[in-house]
Amino acid sequence: MITIYHNPKCRKSREGLEYLKAKGQEFTIVEYLKNPLTKEVLEDILVKLNIPAKELVRTQEDVFKEKFKGKNFTNDEWVRILLENPKLIQRPIIVKEYKAILGQPLEEIDKLFKK
């Protein structure tokens, strides 16, 4: 099963959703701003992305610039920050089985369908 973590207000997330639809695959949409991620789900996504939490942070967001820019946090602290400020999570995130990708650029999505 494929899951897309999506923010409908984000142009890149909408483009990722349309790209996924064009692939003809069945998938589940999780609007993570309406249905917040649990710590376990976020940590599972990070494992599948194979990145530390800091790399999932949208550094162009005002909340990042105002509260977090230039500060050092542990991975666990970044996880907590992302859970408390889900707008900071990069999007879209597409998960298929044991792998996840950030759908930027869109062609990254193709990596989920290669054998």
Image (cartoon, grey):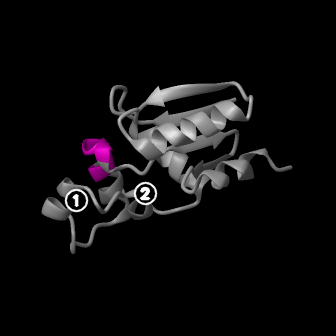
Q: Is residue 86 magenta?
A: yes
In the rendering, at what x and y percent does residue 46 appear?
A: 51, 52
Calculate the distance from the C-alpha at mark 2 to the C-alpha at mark 1: 12 Å
Secondary element type, mark 2: helix
In the rendering, at what x and y percent does residue 100 appear?
A: 62, 48
In the rendering, at what x and y percent does residue 103 appear?
A: 56, 50
Secondary element type, mark 1: helix
- Return the residue nearer the eye: 22 or 103: 22
Residue 72 picture quarter: bottom left
Q: Which mark is residue 64?
A: 1
Relative to residue 21, is residue 65 drawn left or right?
A: left
Q: Residues within 10 Å of mark 1 (few under 14, many from 20)?
A: some
Specify the amino acid type for callout 1.
Phe
**Magenta span: helix, strand or loop, mainly?**
helix
Specify the amino acid type for callout 2.
Leu
Name the residue: 38% across, 41% down. Answer: 10
In the rendering, at what x and y percent does residue 66 appear?
A: 13, 61
**Residue interval drawn in magenta:** 81-87
Name the residue: 18% across, 54% down. Answer: 63
Q: Residues within 10 Å of mark 2 (few under 14, many from 20)?
A: some
Q: Is residue 28 magenta?
A: no
Residue 27 vs 64, above or below: the answer is: above
The residue beneath circle 2 is 56
Name the residue: 42% across, 43% down. Answer: 11
Residue 64 picture quarter: bottom left
Residue 98 vs 78, above or below: the answer is: above
